[in-house]
Image (cartoon, rainbow, N blue to C red):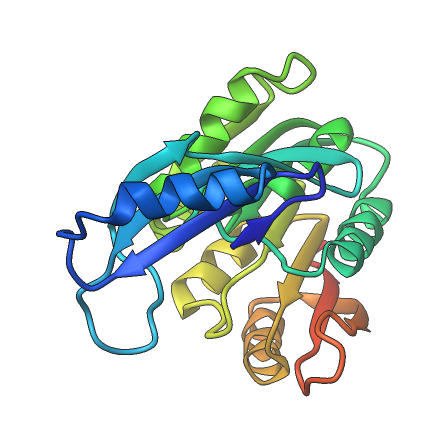
Amino acid sequence: MRATEVGQVMVTLVTARPDWPEAPAVADALAAACPVVVSVLLNVNATAGNRILGDEERPLHGQSTVEDRIGEVNVRLSSRSFFQTNRQVASRIYRDLVAAVPARVARAVDVYSGAGPIALSLAPRADEVVAIEENSAATAVAAAFIAEQDAVVGRVRVVTGDAARCLAQVAAADLVVLNPPRKGCAAPVLAAACRLRPRLLAYVSCDPETLARDLAGLAAGGARILRITPYDMMPHTPHVETLALLTLR
């Protein structure tokens, strides 16, 4: 279940097989029992392992997306859009990141952008924001949502594709944000970021071990660490979210 700040709930029912005749009735019963459930989806994942969601999905009840808010920005989420579970701490990270940005930058690049909360948070400080994300389901929803926002339309551009390849196609950037999954950044992503030599490079990490590895790679590419701040994103667990600020100027 995904419960949003604006009071909407999305329920995603995950099955190993697509043939579940009772699924529509279950969806209707869920929505009837809890009016804030505005979306019920059936996701099919026949694979083994720890991957929760599969690529096949269909709506059972209501809409296929939900609206959420983090910090000062609204976002639209699909079931497969990555979004931080702790909004309060995540909004603090984004606020600290934005506060570190120079008064105005020509272009900011948000790599591993997900639903786009960082890209949208940066929009008031940048003439252009390029949001790069490999998950096509997330980018389709994010692009459609951004197209409806008069304040950012034409200034926030969503790009779907491999992080290293898309970042390598960016000609110049004053600000680069890396927000990778737990495995961190591949070496070509770090190299592409260093090639741009941004005034500010922000790395949002959910794993201190891969962060240390990637900071060493960025330092080898000429980056200098300005500040590292840890955040207790998931209390009572050993996990730490970290914002590292660097410069290549």
Q: Indicate the position of residue 89 as horizontal and vertical percent values.
A: 78, 60
Q: Is residue 14 visible?
A: yes
- Toward the viewer: 105 or 120? 120
Horizontal arrangement in the rendering, residue 139 relative to residue 156 (left or right): left
Residue beneath the point at 76% across and 50% down: 94
Horizontal arrangement in the rendering, residue 115 relative to residue 238 (left or right): left
Quadrant of the rendering where the C terminus is positioned = bottom right
Q: Is residue 208 above or below residue 66?
A: below
Q: Indicate the position of residue 95 as horizontal and vertical percent values.
A: 82, 48
- Quadrant location of residue 203? bottom right
Residue beneath the point at 67% across and 41% down: 174
- Toward the viewer: 161 or 150? 150
Horizontal arrangement in the rendering, residue 218 relative to residue 32 (left or right): right
- Toward the viewer: 207 or 50? 50
Q: Count the marks.
A: 0
Residue beneath the point at 19% across and 69% down: 47
Q: Indicate the position of residue 75 as horizontal and vertical percent values.
A: 61, 35
Q: Indicate the position of residue 180 as horizontal and vertical percent values.
A: 52, 62
Q: Is residue 197 visible?
A: no
Q: Is residue 221 above or below residue 249?
A: below
**Residue that sits furthest to the top in the current view:** 150
- Quadrant location of residue 78? top left
Residue beneath the point at 77% across and 31% down: 125
Q: Is residue 130 above or below residue 53?
A: above
